[in-house]
Image (cartoon, rainbow, N blue to C red):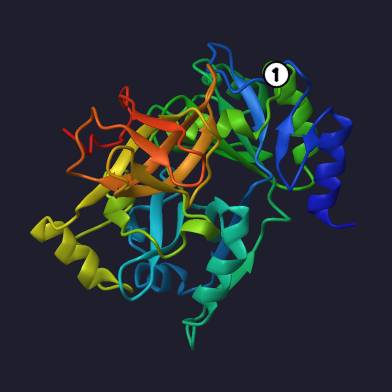
Amino acid sequence: MNAQLSWKDFLVAQGARIRADQVTEFGPADSPAREERARIVPLLHFGVVGVSGADAEAFLQAQLTCDVGEVGAETARFGGYCNPKGRLIATFLILRAADRYLMVLPHAMAGVLAERLRKYVLRSKVGIDDLSDQAPLLGIVGKAWTEVLAAANLDPAPRQTLACVRGRAASLVALPQDCALVIAAARDAPALWRTLAQVAPPAGAAAWDWQQLRAGIAMVVPATQEAFLPQMLDLDRLGGVSYRKGCYPGQEIVARTHYLGEVKRGLALLHSEAAAAPGDELLVTESGEAAGVVASAAAAPTGGWDLLAVVRRDLPRRAMLRLKDAGGAGVSFLEPQGSPVSSTAQ
């Protein structure tokens, strides 16, 4: 039986409700609300691409926006893969496993990234595999997430964001805004889940998505593929763009944009009363002019939807926006509250 299907069957037996390859909830009490206690979240909607071989580091260094030389056994990095025009085809978190690099990204983009990278392997000693079915992913959210680690033999907790620790059954990466990512082997995932669930109640994907959004992390998905420059998603502020490394697809445009300050749109945190999704267009309410595009959206704990959107930098923070296809539902700016999200409008 396919490992991913076995993992899904196991989660259903634990009370998960799954729709469109995403855990929607673990019962009616499940909520995306940010709490002091930790919650564990099965990340079925994320996948893993593995890159192995003697030339893996050199190959990736010539393809990705981040400095792959900074990715080691104890350090992960955010990164992106661009087309020749500098537009992001995919964004990801990259870390080093024992014999390969692992790139974690939305499940729908894993096959896309793997296929695009394979086109440039040529004679390099590199293997590229979609490992989404072999490496179940778990998220830990909440201020007390570090207390969960000892139960999984992943103690002591990482002291810095993007630091990695490894245990017998899993690897863990500390992320911004009280989150951690756990990568497990398929054979170990059920036992690891049972161990973690004893100290951290389970939650659906919305809990993870909202925390990531509030941390200023907006991953490229099919609806936004090749829509944004890295700077528009604050990928540089997340450490996912190196301006000192050598060439990669789109590097000239990305570097010129940085040094000439030509980014006219940037990431902003917004709130909508209506449901929204990546790729949705935003308009200025009064004039009907184009304002931006939704990059990420998640249900807010207090109602409505919080959004990360790439919007015009000339918009004042008092500006009222609306979703183009949501019957005029209002959208307003929010304060980032300590996340790496830039304040795009003054």
| Residue 16: image location, x then y, percent | 80, 31
Q: Answer whether residue 84 is visible to the viewer in this image.
A: yes
Q: Is residue 168 above or below residue 1?
A: above
Residue at the spot 39% in from the left edge and 32% down from the top edge: 331
Q: Quadrant of residue 55?
A: bottom left
Residue under circle 1? 201
* Residue 274 point in image, percent of width and height: 53, 32
Task: Determine whether 93 is above or below 17 in the image.
Answer: below
**Quadrant where the image shows the N terminus:** bottom right
Give the quadrant of residue 51.
bottom right
- In the displayed structure image, the side of residue 99 where residue 87 appears, left or right: left
Secondary structure type for disc 1? loop
Query: Can residue 245 be seen by looking at this rendering?
Result: no
Image quarter (top left, top right, bottom left or bottom right) of the C terminus: top left
Image coordinates of residue 220 in percent, x first then y, are 47, 54
Q: Nearer the viewer, residue 65 or 328?
A: 328
